[in-house]
Image (cartoon, grey):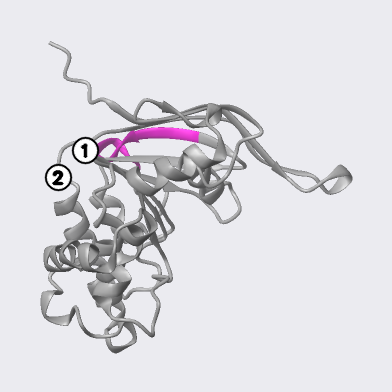
Amino acid sequence: MNTTPAIAARSRAITKSFGDGNSRIQVLHGVDLDAYESEILMLLGPSGCGKTTLISILAGTLTPDSGEVNVFGEDLHLMKKSAITRFRAKQIGFIFQQFNLIPTITCEENVCVPLLIQGYSMSKALPFARKSLEQVGLGEHMRKRSNQLSGGQQQRVAIARALVHNPRLIICDEPTAALDAENGKMVMELFRELMRQPGRCAIVVTHDHRILPYSDRIATMNDGRILESVPTSQFDFDHHS
């Protein structure tokens, strides 16, 4: 019996450059990477090594120069931009370092945004937003503005926003970098619990070694290449400390 998890996102021979002529810089050099369903895969590496570029390509917000990208059976590199936008709106959620919340509206209105993009009315989106905020333990704060909350609470709002439309792939770019140790731990414990739902996958770019134990697998990058991708239990924490 095959117990290998299904592949959620796959890249093959991905290259990406920026700039023109003599100023052109190649950021990714033939990257191969698999991310599996029901796992948290963390990408670790120095600034400028291509991590954010890679996850942007996997999320369909950047187009590779060459190579193949498949997310839940869809070949993004073959799709038109409009089709990628529709796919991303339904299947992909984003969590950022700086939360990217709108400070002048309430938490529940912030969480509604992905649904409004899909064409939901506010009245239809609000019940889903409230349920998502309750999932992350913020039910009593849903009518507060985001700037009335702590950093840890704001990141939980951002997680609720990323998950409100029930995406299958969650892309996180430094989700704990703006948080202290206690709030970072709280956010990752919550995230780990939410990722236990079947059919989901999270890819997390991080410099924060404190959160590496919350991953299932760790891929290290440098100079636009994947150096290794191993289960967290086999990762050499001493070497990378």
Q: Which mark is residue 38?
A: 1
Task: Say which element carries label 1.
Answer: loop
Viewer can see residue 203: no
Circles 1 and 2 in contact, beta carbons < 8 Å: yes
Q: Does the segment drawn in magenta span residue 241?
A: no
Circle 2 sits on which residue? 196
Q: Is residue 11 left or right of residue 26?
A: left
Compared with residue 214, is residue 180 higher up or lower down, i.e. above or below? Answer: below
Compared with residue 22, is residue 128 higher up or lower down, i.e. above or below? Answer: below
Q: Nearer the viewer, residue 227 or 38?
A: 38
Disc 1 and disc 2: Cα gap in Å? 6 Å
Q: Position of residue 208 (x, y in %)?
A: 38, 60
Compared with residue 192, is residue 159 higher up or lower down, i.e. above or below? Answer: below
Residue at point 36% right, 53% down?
A: 118
Q: Nearer the viewer, residue 41 or 142?
A: 142
**Mark 1 burial class by Cα count in 10 Å: few <14, some 14-19, many 20+:** many
Q: Which residues are magenta?
A: 227-236
**Mark 2 burial class by Cα count in 10 Å: few <14, some 14-19, many 20+:** some
Q: Which mark is residue 96?
A: none
Q: What amino acid type is highlighted by mark number 2? A: Arg
Task: Say which element carries label 2.
Answer: loop
